[in-house]
Image: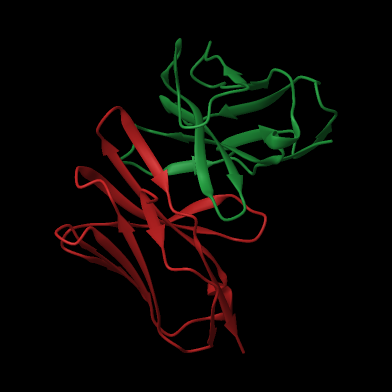
Chain colours: A green, B red
Amino acid sequence: NAGVTQTPKFQVLKTGQSMTLQCAQDMNHEYMSWYRQDPGMGLRLIHYSVGAGITDQGEVPNGYNVSRSTTEDFPLRLLSAAPSQTSVYFCASSYSRGNTEAFFGQGTRLTVV
Amino acid sequence: RKEVEQDPGPFNVPEGATVAFNCTYSNSASQSFFWYRQDCRKEPKLLMSVYSSGNEDGRFTAQLNRASQYISLLIRDSKLSDSATYLCVVTGNTGGFKTIFGAGTRLFVKA
């Protein structure tokens, strides 16, 4: 069972570079989300999607874009990387929004230098 | 004030000990509550949901007090394998549905 697959697991970027973090789930979940995790701050919601073609901003959306063209895929794009975006990024999916178990990908450790 | 606050850690306990984690939330309209476990450098995984009536899963007991806006997790007979970070998670539907994660409490169980 693949569950939620995130790639890459590690990435180093130079300031100003752009990149896309990939996320795919095979559980036919409607709800998908992206979080960043920083020491002492817990997971913070960046963007989320309640279904294909529908996305919305979370708590910390600046500097990131998302799209949801299919139920399975929910990529996160960093437009112009900044050192403040150094973090661990997690993609998650769930059957519905909020009241069911969220399944997480293995995370992407991003360093911006 | 953070929307979800947890006990500061880390907790260092010997094997076999009972340990309790507390969590408070600020939004009285919050609807669903969970405890997640996160191992070092791994993704969070659901440990258990928290119901108003309280719920138990083996050595783990979770309780919810809506009046005090307080959630707890009790671990009995701690094992070395319980060493992890425990995340309190609260969801609600005010101003848009939100899932809020606490910063987590780190637990070290020692032999």
Quadrant of the image occupied by residue A49: top left
Residue drawn at (37%, 33%) of the image: A95
Residue drawn at (50%, 52%) of the image: B45
**Coordinates of residue A111 in the picture (x, y in percent):** 78, 39
Which quarter of the rendering shows the C terminus of chain B? Answer: bottom right
Quadrant of the image occupied by residue A83: top right
**Coordinates of residue A60 in the picture (x, y in percent):** 52, 31
**Coordinates of residue A104 in the picture (x, y in percent):** 54, 42
Whether residue A77 appears in this view of the structure is yes
Question: Residue pushed farthest front?
Answer: B1
Relative to A97, is A13 on the left or the right? Answer: right
Decide: is B106 above or below A10: below
Decide: is B111 above or below A79: below
Whether residue B58 appears in this view of the structure is no
Relative to A82, is A63 on the left or the right? Answer: left
Number of numbered callouts drawn: 0
Decide: is B36 above or below A23: below
Relative to B101, is A60 on the left or the right? Answer: right
Relative to B52, is A91 on the left or the right? Answer: right
Quadrant of the image occupied by residue B39: bottom right
**Coordinates of residue A37 in the picture (x, y in percent):** 59, 45
